[in-house]
Image: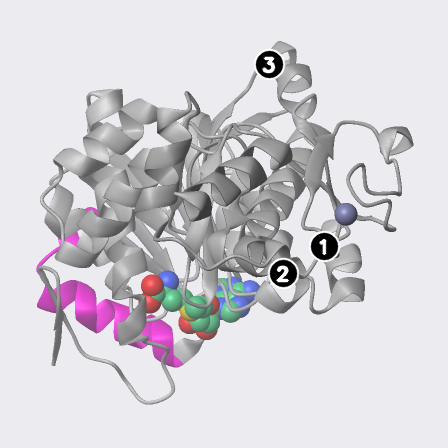
């Protein structure tokens, strides 16, 4: 028997359970708590790729905010395993368990009065093939979590795979985790827009080997264009680490504004906000594990920062100075009137609204004093 959070589960042979993904489930629990608080009622939740069922079971046991839980896995042993875990945790009267393909179970719920308030899609690899049915199974103003372990594609290692699966160009650089998060976000938004649905991110994190984006969905055509207008590109110089963002591909300058070197681009990707502050605040109110609370505190600091970040070690080595402490650099940026924070995406990462020149000048100044 395994204990995780308030759940006790058995894991049958051949059924997936990764103890290391506890943090991702801790965050998910806090998210469910936050959105139920925001909606002012209990939720109907679906986990269509549930494996042991641990995630959905924890959502129900730990938030006291779940009215009904639908769990599904296409693997027979997993289905049997979920049934047993639902019984062990005494939630049978509030749960349905299915043994179907995820798309089928979601489509079956894509009708009035059967739709969910929150769907959590947690597959192996790319989630893209489940996004459309996930959206169709959601009630207006419902929430969708999309997880991906397809990091080779979205972090710029498997570039062709990224083009195939996300219709985006990725880049492997010091802020590739944020590029990956934003490529996945844009791909989901575009699938929603093709279905005339407005999808907007409200929370995101990239931890260990996976990426998770949480969205809110509205059935509102007028809300789609303002969201699509926040999709664009990042431009990057490998030589001096200069970067910028732009909206339309014709604006790609191809050469670095600082050193003249050839630049590369990533995108289409989401350039807008990844977070809604009230959701983070409610997540912070939830009594969580130490690890999850730490992650949430860092995310809270970076939530309103612009897209992308600098890494102190690579900047310092580019300009040939000894690397200062991260806190010192952040403080110095703030002293100079800029916004600055660390980021959960990189231990040496700094998010700031200061531009490249300003960051470099402040870094040089620290070393002079
Ligand atoms: C990464 S695991 C889910 C882990 C689980 N959410 C957790 O937090 O422990 C992915 C699961 O999806 C199932 N699966 C894969 N393809 C599927 C499909 N097309 N429909 C339904 N289940 C599927 C696998 O059998 C596996 O149990
Ligand atoms: Zn350059």
Q: Residues within 10 Å of mark 1 (few under 14, many from 20)?
A: many
> Mark 1 near mark 3, Cβ–Cβ under 8 Å?
no
Q: Quadrant of residue 187?
A: top right
Q: Which residue is mark 3?
A: 223
Figure quadrant of the C terminus: top left
Which residue is nearer to you in this view: 287 or 138? 287
For the question of whether residue 115 can be seen, the reply is no
Counting residues from the start of the chain, the first of labels 1 and 3 encountered is: 1
- Magenta-drawn stretch, dominant element (helix, strand or loop): helix
SS label for mark 3: helix
Q: Is residue 229 above or below residue 80?
A: above
- The mark lying in front, picked from 1 and 3, is 1
State the residue at coordinates (32%, 89%). Answer: 13
Q: Is residue 352 above or below residue 95?
A: above
For the question of whether residue 245 can be seen, the reply is yes
Q: Which residue is mark 2?
A: 155
Q: Give the residues in magenta.
A: 77-95
Counting residues from the start of the chain, the first of labels 2 and 3 encountered is: 2
Residue 84 is situated, as x and y percent measured from the top left of the image, at 19, 72
SS label for mark 1: loop
State the residue at coordinates (33%, 44%). Answer: 328
Q: Residues within 10 Å of mark 2 (few under 14, many from 20)?
A: many
């Amino acid at each position: 028997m395994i204990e995780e959070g308030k759940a006790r589960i058995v894991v049958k042979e051949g059924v997936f359970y990764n103890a290391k993904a506890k943090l991702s489930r801790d965050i998910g629990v806090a998210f469910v708590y936050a959105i139920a608080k925001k909606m002012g009622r209990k939720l109907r939740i679906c986990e269509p790729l549930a494996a042991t069922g641990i995630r959905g079971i924890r959502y129900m046991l730990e938030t006291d905010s779940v009215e009904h839980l639908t769990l599904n896995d296409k693997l027979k042993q997993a289905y049997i395993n979920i049934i047993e875990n639902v019984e062990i945790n005494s939630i049978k009267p509030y749960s349905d368990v299915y043994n179907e393909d995820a798309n089928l179970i979601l489509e079956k719920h894509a009708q009035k009065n059967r739709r969910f308030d929150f769907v959590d899609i947690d597959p192996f690899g790319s989630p893209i093939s489940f996004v459309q049915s996930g959206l169709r199974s959601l009630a207006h103003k419902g929430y969708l979590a999309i997880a991906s372990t397809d990091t080779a594609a979205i972090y710029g290692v498997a570039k062709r795979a990224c083009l195939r699966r996300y219709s985006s160009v990725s880049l492997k650089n010091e802020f590739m985790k944020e590029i990956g998060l934003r490529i996945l976000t844009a791909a989901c938004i575009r699938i929603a827009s093709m279905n005339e649905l407005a999808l907007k991110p409200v929370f995101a994190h990239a931890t260990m080997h996976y990426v998770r984006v949480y969205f809110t969905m509205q059935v509102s055509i007028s809300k789609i264009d303002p969201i699509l207008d926040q999709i664009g590109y990042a431009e990057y110089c490998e030589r001096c680490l200069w970067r910028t963002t732009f909206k339309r591909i014709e604006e790609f300058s191809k050469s670095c504004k600082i050193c003249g070197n050839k630049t590369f681009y990533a995108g289409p990707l989401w350039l807008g906000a990844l977070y809604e502050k009230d959701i983070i605040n409610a997540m912070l109110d939830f009594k969580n594990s130490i690890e999850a609370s730490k992650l949430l505190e860092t995310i809270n600091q970076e939530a309103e920062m612009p897209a992308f970040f600098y890494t102190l070690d690579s900047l310092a080595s580019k300009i040939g100075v000894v690397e200062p402490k991260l806190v010192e650099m952040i403080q110095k940026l703030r002293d100079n009137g800029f916004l600055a924070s660390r980021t959960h995406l990189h231990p040496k990462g700094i998010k700031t609204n200061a531009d490249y020149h300003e960051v470099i000048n402040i870094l040089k100044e620290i070393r002079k004093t």
